[in-house]
Image: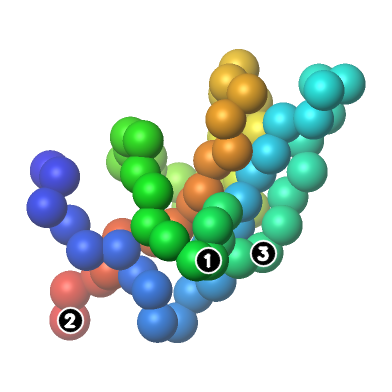
Amino acid sequence: MGGEALETGHVTPAAVRRRADGTSAVADGPVRADEETLGGWFIVDVADREEAVELAKSLPTPETIEIRPILESV
């Protein structure tokens, strides 16, 4: 794994940001629309976007997490 393409045409990514008070904010759209930046990635098997968002909210990191699905082969 590691060479998969990300779905970019039909699904809006989600961005999960940890606030200073420990809660999380979820927004539609990429973390940064003006440039591409990638610090690392995880591939997780979840049922849907909502489960992926809940998983991202539970991670103990101050960084913003962007959620995108892998492009499915037809």
Q: Position of residue 24 (x, y in %)?
A: 77, 35
Q: Position of residue 34 (x, y in %)?
A: 50, 66
56 and 72: which is toward the camera: 56
35 and 60: which is toward the camera: 35
Numbered badge on residue 72: none
Residue receiving disc 2: 74
Q: What's the residue at 28%, 68% (across, down)?
A: 71
How far separated are the C-alphas under marks 2 and 1?
28 Å
Q: What's the residue at 25%, 70% (across, down)?
A: 72
Per the image, label 2 sits on a secondary structure element best described as loop
Q: Which label sits in the foreground, 3 or 2?
A: 3
Residue receiving disc 3: 28
CB within 8 Å, label 3 to label 1: no
Residue receiving disc 1: 33
The image quadrant that residue 29 belongs to is bottom right
Mark earlier in primary sequence (3, 2): 3
Mark earlier in primary sequence (2, 1): 1
Q: In the picture shown, does residue 31 fall above or below 20?
A: below
Q: Is residue 8 left or right of residue 1?
A: right
Residue 54 shows in the view = no
Per the image, label 3 sits on a secondary structure element best described as strand
74 and 25: which is toward the camera: 25
Q: Residue furthest top?
A: 60
Label 1 amino acid?
A: Ala
Q: Crowding at label 2, few (<14), some or many (≥20) Cα neighbours within 10 Å?
A: few
Label 3 amino acid?
A: Asp
